[in-house]
Amino acid sequence: MPELPEVEAVAVTLRPLVRGKTIRRCRIIHSIAVRPPAGYGEKRAARQIESQLKGRKILEVERLGKYLLLRFERGFVALHFRLDGQLVWFADSKLSGHIDVAFHMDRGTLGFVDRRHFGRVQWLERIADSKGIDQLGVDPLSKEFTVGCLENLLSSSKRPLKEFLLEQDKIAGIGNIYSSESLWRARLDPRRRAYRVTPAEARRLHKAIVDVLRRALECCLDPAPDFRNPDWWFQGLENILRAYDREGLRCRRCKGRIRRIEQGGRSTYACLKCQK
């Protein structure tokens, strides 16, 4: 699932491509991609998005947590990629391959693609109209994410550290991959209760989170997403991972074995020899 670094890389790359462009027509090809408001059916929600977006100019491309936002003078389009949703770009209005939602502009078409139909596209009059976005916590790459901020969040939570890091209303944008990586970097056992983390450990975890996310973002931008290639995906991330998906392999720090444990129905990867 795309997490903060992947979505930020998409935002950075997409921004100069679509900012200032006017959507001449929006086509909902597969209505399942539209998250309907309460009381709406998919087809009604699709018609609403198509009518709302016609003639609107994209003022900015933004990221909030794992959400990508297209901001207009009034309203937003929120895209959530879930497991493997992605964007593709066509130089004209002729589409090919699987496309769920097409944003036709003056020169080119932006397509939202998710063959498994987990990803969603949503029209919002206000950010507050989306409970998921409105309740997002602090962005870990923002100046508001300080050591003190993290200490306060940790002290008020009795959840295991791994599960704590996945709570989007606490820290927005971290998922299964970078929570495991951050805890490995900070040498902290993912099963530790958040409120039991000491101030020194909180400083270590804060540095680990920021460093891991920044390094992943660099990797996601080198090479940058190629929206013109329908088969594009992020390359090289596996080369920077130290814990995630490395079950049975040697820890690159202490030479112990990386273990996979289940937490909250998800896989956690850790070296329980050096993560205490």
Image (tube, rainbow, N blue to C red):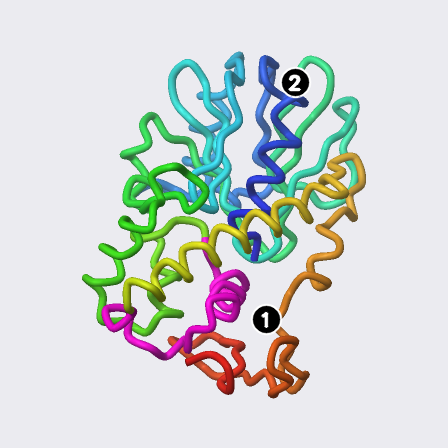
Is 185 left or right of 221, judged from the image as shown? left
In the picture, the quarter occupied by the N terminus is bottom right
Q: Is residue 180 magenta?
A: yes
Circles 1 and 2: CB atoms closer than 8 Å: no
Q: Nearer the viewer, mark 1 or mark 2?
A: 1
Q: Residues within 10 Å of mark 1 (few under 14, many from 20)?
A: many
At label 2, the amino acid type is Met
Q: Which residue is mark 1?
A: 244
**Quarter location, residue 162:** bottom left
Q: Which residue type does callout 1 highlight?
A: Tyr
Q: CA distance from mark 1 to mark 2?
A: 40 Å
Lower sequence index among marks 1 and 2: 2
Q: Quadrant of the C terminus?
A: bottom left
Q: Residue at x 62, y 54 (%)?
A: 84
Is 191 positioned to the left or the right of 178 in the image?
A: left
Q: Nearer the viewer, residue 212 or 262?
A: 212
The local secondary structure at tag 2 comes to: strand
Residue at screen point 73% across, 63% down:
239
Furthest toward the front, the residue is 200
Q: Position of residue 60 (x, y in %)?
A: 51, 21
Residue sitting nearer the eye, 41 or 137: 137
Which residue is found at the position 28% from the left and 49% from the top?
Answer: 149
Relative to 38, 100 lies left or right:
right
User: Is residue 236 rendered magenta in the image?
Assistant: no
181 to 214, vertically: above or below: below
Residue 68 in the image, given as x and y percentages of width and height: 50, 37
Q: Which mark is residue 101?
A: none
Report the magenta residues as a range: 174-197
Q: In the rendered image of this protein, does residue 64 appear above or below residue 70? A: below
Dot 1 falls on a residue whose secondary structure is loop
Residue identified by numbered label 2: 105
